Amino acid sequence: MVECDVALNKCKQEKMKTDTKCSTPDCAKCTSSYKTCHDNAVNSIQPVTIECTTDKDHKRLMLVGTNPNPFPETCDVTCTFLTGDKQQVSEHREPVNLPKQAVKASLDDNANPGKPPITNLVTKAVCK
């Protein structure tokens, strides 16, 4: 939606160079285009996914996310898992920034969350 705001401001600045009161249909079209952009963004919001995972050796805890939307997301994520010594661990990360239109983006990793291997991963994510 930020992109809609930027486009509106750019359009109005351009049109108001010659129409200082923004009274022409061309200038009014800026607002109409903004409304369409905003409505499309709101109505086309797709769900994002964030997954707690590990490297292939199950030693490093990692976050991977996908965001098909045209705007970034900020999420709080909790990864719960078992370590190699059977300890249950919960790691909470906030904020986790998920870039716009990201596909399986590496978001965060922790080199040593506990004794490997890391198993039984459960992800809980809440995006704002």
Image (spheres, rainbow, N blue to C red):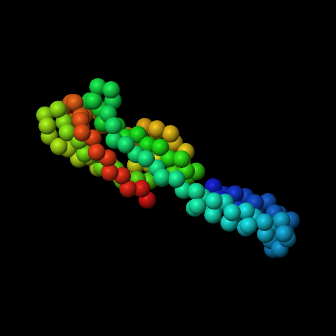
- Percent of width and height locating residue 60: 29, 32
Toward the top, the furthest residue is: 57
Q: Residue at x 86, y 65 (%)?
A: 18
- Percent of width and height locating residue 34: 69, 63
Image quadrant in which you'd find residue 83? top left
Comparing 33 with 109, the one in front is 33
Q: Quadrant of the C terminus?
A: bottom left
Q: How many marks?
A: 0
Residue 23 falls left or right of residue 78: right
Can residue 1 be seen here? The reply is no
Q: Residue at x 36, y 52 (%)?
A: 125
Q: Quadrant of the N terminus?
A: bottom right
Q: Residue at x 46, y 38 (%)?
A: 104
- Percent of width and height locating residue 59: 26, 30
- Vertical position of residue 49 compared to residue 44: above or below: above
- Vertical position of residue 122 compared to residue 85: above or below: below
Q: Residue at x 58, y 57 (%)?
A: 44
Comparing 41 with 6, the one in front is 41
Comparing 12 with 58, the one in front is 58
Can residue 31 be seen here? The reply is yes
Image quadrant in which you'd find residue 101? top right
Image quadrant in which you'd find residue 113? top left
Residue 118 falls left or right of residue 18: left
